[in-house]
Image: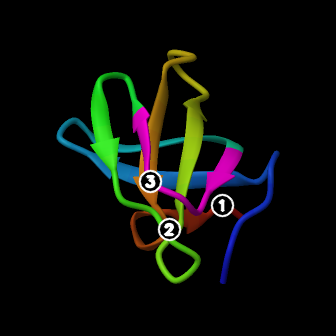
Amino acid sequence: MGFSKGDEVAWSTSQGETHGTVQERRVRDFTFDGQRFRASDDEPYYVVESAKTGAKAAHKESALRKRS
């Protein structure tokens, strides 16, 4: 699978499904918005920007779906 910068993706939130754009792919441990993420080549995380709010968040690859 895998996503590239600019890909349109969707993910689930407590308010339902939302969608946005991939901003970057992370494969090393990092801190984002005060939270620590353990990323690797086998389990990358993606920083995504919400199309609705413009807010950015980090999600593991398995939480994202490609929008068609």
* Element at label 3: loop
Marks 3 and 1, the one that precedes in the sequence: 3
Marks 1 and 2, the one that precedes in the sequence: 2
Q: In this view, does 25 lie above or below 42?
A: above
Residue position for label 1 = 67
Q: Nearer the viewer, residue 48 or 35?
A: 35
Image depth: mark 3 or mark 1 in front:
3
Tell me how far mark 3 sits from mark 1, CA to CA: 27 Å
Where residue 37 appears, as percent x and y from the top left, is 35, 50
**Mark 1 nearby-residue class (10 Å; few <14, some 14–19, many ≥20):** few
Residue position for label 2 = 61
Image depth: mark 2 or mark 3 in front:
3
Q: Which of 31 and 58 is in front in this view?
A: 31
* Element at label 2: helix
Measuring 50% from the left and 68% from the top, which residue is drawn there?
61
Q: In the image, is 16 to the left or to the right of 49? A: left
Q: Nearer the viewer, residue 32 or 53?
A: 32
Please state the total of marks drawn on the protein image. 3
Magenta segment boundaries in residue numbering: 24-31
- Mark linked to residue 29: 3
